[in-house]
Image (spheres, helix red, strand yellow):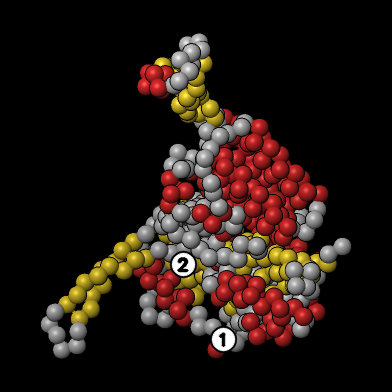
């Protein structure tokens, strides 16, 4: 039986730190570690799974949210760390089941391929919020793509007419006078007729993609009953398509999937094209721009996202549901954008330049017609002020408030270190005017 090794990383681990605790033999997987750390430096956390043929081993890497500190003795096969990651990750499904979170657009709302995770309905998303294994999320995701293809081919019955030439002694089609005259056997009547046949280039492309998925993606899963079912369903879909006996003189290779000539074939079936892209690991290609591709190791199962953006949605939910706040309304995602003129001039110049300054706080809460500006900070307030300057957070909060003629705001953090000099739930007054704000911690369980 092939061994599986699970490794847990902190959000702020450097590449050097990772190499300091992994085994010497595992340094052969450096190309995967580079991909993982590159994502980390782009402020993304996530889960990565692959099979390394050199060590004949499955690897699972978890990059944990900074609110869960992985200790040195928890680096390998830590069940508690895995539960904590899944708990944090499950908030995504809990929130999409509850709110209309915009997905798969150019803004990349959650900043990674987590938004490629599909769900058939809000009910299924709610059910997934209680999943116990990361494989449950991923297998469900691939099953959804297969369902998209299955639904399409259930109805897909594209046909074309092919001109077929033949000769017989009885009349059954359109006579070809020239061939009939020149044929030495005058009893032969040369004819032609249009024959209807099933024809689909999309069917050919889909079969190639499914075979690639089986041979290159599924093998990276640790073998479970759900994964075996996924493989069987993929083979069954191939057989279903082949039974329709689609004819085509079209040939296709997997590396042609992103070419514009291939994209053109799916003009009327964009959802089918998206499903095919996701099955081969091109999740981020079809995201508002057909010719944009985010490079990714295709034989790696990966889920990554920006935790601070998910945290904003967690805060949004808390502000709406908690009796502690009791706001009348909470605005999010640019629903209270303001632009303010600001002026600048060159030294020793009479010419003045005007530009616009965008003000887009994370959230704006309203109670009794008073606006409270809210910034959700995915940072841990340290006990040592020199590690983190909170002044920049305060200045931005104050600026956003002043633009809206408000003098109240909240700075919200997920965690505070013991011994931190700042006091929670206490009103602070900005030194230079009447702006008042509070520091609040809203934890993520």
Residue corresponding to mark 2: 409
> Residue 282 is drawn in which quadrant?
bottom right
| Residue 364 in the figure: left or right of residue 116 | left
Residue 26 position in % (x across, y down) = 75, 78
Mark 2 surroundings within 10 Å by alpha-carbon count, few (fewer than 14), some (14 through 19), many (20 or more): many
Task: Give the residue furthest to the right.
Answer: 1
Q: Residue at x 78, y 59 (%)?
A: 222
Distance CA(mark 2)–CA(mark 1)? 23 Å
Question: Which is more toward the observer, 297 or 19?
Answer: 297
- In the rendered view of the protein, which quadrant contains the C terminus? bottom right
Q: Which residue is mark 1?
A: 387
Q: Position of residue 356 (x, y in %)?
A: 27, 67
Q: Are marks 2 and 1 in contact (CB under 8 Å)?
A: no
Tell me if residue 367 can be seen: no
| Relative to 63, 405 lies left or right | left
- Of mark 2 and mark 1, the one earlier in the sequence is 1
């Amino acid at each position: 039986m092939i061994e599986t090794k699970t490794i847990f990383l902190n959000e702020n681990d450097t590449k050097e730190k990772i190499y300091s605790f992994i085994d010497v033999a595992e340094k052969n997987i450096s190309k995967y570690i580079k991909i993982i750390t590159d994502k980390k430096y782009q402020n993304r956390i996530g889960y990565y799974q692959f099979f390394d043929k050199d060590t004949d081993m499955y690897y699972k890497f978890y990059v944990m949210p900074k609110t869960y500190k992985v200790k040195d003795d928890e680096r390998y096969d830590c069940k508690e760390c895995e539960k904590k990651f899944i708990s944090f990750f499950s908030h995504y499904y809990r929130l999409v089941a509850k709110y209309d979170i915009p997905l798969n657009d150019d803004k990349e709302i959650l900043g990674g391929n987590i938004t490629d995770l599909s769900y058939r309905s809000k009910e299924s998303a709610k059910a997934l919020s209680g999943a116990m294994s990361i494989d449950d999320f991923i297998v469900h995701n691939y099953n959804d793509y297969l369902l998209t293809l299955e639904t399409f081919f259930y109805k897909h019955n594209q046909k074309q007419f092919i001109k077929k030439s033949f000769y017989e002694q009885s009349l059954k089609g359109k006579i070809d006078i020239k061939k009939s005259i020149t044929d030495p056997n005058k009893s032969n009547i040369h004819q032609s007729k249009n024959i209807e046949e099933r024809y689909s280039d999309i069917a050919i492309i889909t079969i190639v993609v499914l075979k690639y998925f089986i041979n290159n993606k599924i093998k990276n899963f640790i073998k479970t009953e759900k994964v075996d079912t996924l493989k069987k369903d993929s083979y069954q879909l191939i057989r279903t398509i082949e039974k329709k006996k689609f004819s085509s003189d079209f040939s296709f290779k997997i590396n042609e999937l992103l070419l514009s000539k291939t994209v053109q074939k799916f003009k009327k079936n964009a959802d089918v094209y998206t499903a095919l892209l996701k099955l081969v690991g091109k999740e981020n290609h079809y995201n508002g721009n057909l010719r944009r591709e985010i490079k990714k190791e295709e034989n790696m199962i990966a889920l990554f996202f920006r935790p601070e953006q998910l945290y904003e949605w967690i805060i949004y939910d808390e502000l709406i549901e908690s009796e502690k706040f009791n706001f009348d309304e909470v605005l999010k995602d640019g629903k209270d954008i303001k632009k303010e003129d600001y002026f600048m001039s060159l030294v020793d110049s009479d010419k003045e330049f005007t530009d616009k300054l965008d003000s887009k706080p994370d959230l704006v809460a309203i109670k009794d017609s008073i606006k409270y500006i809210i910034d959700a900070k995915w940072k841990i307030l340290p006990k040592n002020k020199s590690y983190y300057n909170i002044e920049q957070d305060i200045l931005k909060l104050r600026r956003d408030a002043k633009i809206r003629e408000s003098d109240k705001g909240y700075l919200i953090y997920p965690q505070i270190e013991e011994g931190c000099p700042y006091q929670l739930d206490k009103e602070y007054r900005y030194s230079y005017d009447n702006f008042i704000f509070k520091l609040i911690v809203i934890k993520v369980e």
